[in-house]
Image: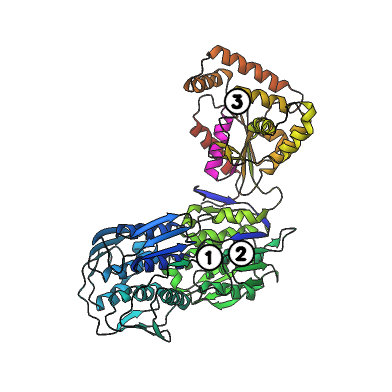
Amino acid sequence: MFSTEFLDVPHLASAGGTVVLPGSKSISNRVLLLAALSAGKTTVRDLLDSDDTRVMLDALRELGCGVSEVGGTVVIDGLSGQVRTTQARLFMGNAGTAMRPLTAALALLCGEFELSGVPRMHERPIGDLVDALRQLGCTIDYLGTPGFPPLRIGKPTLRLDEPISVRGDVSSQFLTALLMSLPLVASRDITINVSGELISKPYIAITLNLLARFGIQVRREGWQRFVIPQGSRYQSPGEIHVEADASSASYFIALGALAAATPGQSGIRIEGVGAASIQGDIRFIDAAQAMGAKIESGPNWLTVSRGTWPLKAIDLDCNHIPDAAMTLAVMALYANGTTTLRNIASWRVKETDRIAAMAIELRKLGATVQGGQDFLQVTPPATWKAAGVHTYDDHRMAMCFSLAAFNPAGLPVRILDPKCVAKTFPDYFETLFSVVVASPNCVPVICVDGPTASGKGTLASVLAHRLGYHYLDSGALYRLTALAALRAGMLLDAAHEAEIAALAKGLPVVFKSGLALLGGQDVTEAIRTEEAGMNASRVSALPAVRTALVALQLSFRQAPGLVADGRDMGTVIFPDAALKVFLTASAAHRAERRHKQLISKGFSTTLNSLRADLEARDARDFSRSVAPLKPAQDAFQLDNSDLSIEESAIQVLTWWETRQPFTST
């Protein structure tokens, strides 16, 4: 997951390949609560691992529920309809799928509880659910603004002889919460009447489907009357699989619809969910097809490719796909006219006011947007603009707007606070980058060159971490090549030059979190020895190996970007880099740094000898005939003799920002 302050998505040209989606948030949290209320153990497979499901799991543990986790499988040891902890303060984050059902369940049990969340959760309405529960004799007090969390829940004095009325036109989660919790007290038939038009009916269908899996057969009369039968009891199914998330599928359905296919690929294949899904948001495929997408479906998969282009503008009632409809708003940027999304009032009470947020951010890109209480109208930009997109701590804002990087103007898109996707799809951006191809030369590169012991590796690593970019330690490649060749039984000589070059071309190396991984194995210490340095010198003298490593270095240029350190990154390997920095610390300062480093590792040395060695190496590097060490003509020169790594990083990032096209963020 990208935990950076922002993520710059470069201009994207095409897409193709297979994505495997995470489990559905809506199904995951429903299943966890139902398993917890049941007797016995329930094995939940393919559970979504995200902020919202962790909130639910933490709450269940605090209530005394047994929870064991192994990979994507969770075993819930149920409570048999009784909490073992009768007093608790539970933090719900911004998870509506945890806050609403737990409020209802705990209000019907004999205990004292407080439920709170992040500031935005305290702005999301819950009054209609509280009103319905109070009709039953539940004791619930507001600890802040009436109608909103946080809440204090006390012991109920239940009255079950009259039907319960709940509004259905604000959030379907209120009805879901009642349906899931009322079997706890079904000593007689319990009737729920829905007042107003029930929105998001497909989400109620998910609830009813899962209740049936846990032994609760709710009788439904249209969408206005629901009856929990007398004697209802939760029964664990023993094992249950969580479908992949249909809302998350919408981003990749849209991707296939709007992106040209990468050569050799036929579009996007989505695994984990098919057209027969129980999730309402799977009907997004109908909207995507109406806009021109070509879609095929199997039992647990979809394939999507571009059909009509530009996409067709649509006018659609989106009440049945409230979450996935956000993706349509970004698809509308690529349509041949004005798209209108209707009946989306529920957007205003989600993680943020999504109608307002969408309108603001789409306008930044150049779109003409009109927003009303329950609709959004989007006309594509006449002139696209580069922009920094605020995400409002809303995962769907971040994922939707990443698709704006396919714009015809060739512009990148900046996503602020990309880690908000952790709510439902922590690896979203990694998954996106695995199936897209950036436009030629649009993947940004920052080069950090400089002499030995100038701190270029440390600085480059920090920059890569701050920007969420890939990192290339070019100097380590020769050490890694030598290590891999020796492990393969090769001698480091001219007789084995072709074999070593072939090995170097496909070297399975990754630089991550300060580590050098070779074939997945951490070899950081192994390549930092004196012997490893001498072996690197031997292989670097082989022309074919140098040529092979040039190709390998170029392959590190992948979305979202690259920070490369070395001695000729800006002059030879990436001459078109967006930013080039050349470090110029004096030999005296570099010797002091190296001396402290070696002493800390227990090596005995002197400052004079280190300085002499560095000056000799500088002389060789600056005067060598092949790729001599020198700053690129357009490089910024940075004397970091008296600068900390943090100060150096701030300076480079300041230079970097001056070269970005984004409007003020």
Instruction: Residue 446: give x, y in percent of width and height.
Output: 62, 39
> Which residue, given by chain and number where applicable, does mark 1 sit on?
244
Under mark 1, the amino acid is Ala
> Left of 158 or right of it: where is 417?
right
**Position of 353 relative to 557 (above/below):** below
Secondary element under disc 1, as helix, strand or loop, is loop
Between the residue at mark 3 and the residue at mark 1, the CA separation in whole angstroms equals 52 Å
For the residue pair 659 and 42, the one nearer the viewer reads as 42
- CB atoms of marks 3 and 2 within 8 Å: no
Quick one: label 2, few (<14), some, or many (20+) residues within 10 Å? many
Count of marks, rendered view: 3
Residue assigned mark 2: 270
The three-letter amino acid code for the residue at tag 2 is Ile
Which numbered disc, 3 or 1, marks the residue closer to the eye?
A: 1
Of the pair 489 and 378, the residue shown nearer to us: 489
Image coords of residue 276 (percent x, y): 56, 75
Q: Are marks 3 and 1 in contact (CB under 8 Å)?
A: no
Q: Earlier in the sequence, mark 3 or mark 1?
A: 1
Q: Amino acid at mark 3?
A: Thr
Residue at point 63% right, 72% down? 297
Q: Earlier in the sequence, mark 1 or mark 2?
A: 1
Q: CA distance from mark 3 to mark 2?
A: 50 Å
Answer yes or no: is residue 374 visible: yes
Give the extent of the magenta segment.
448-470
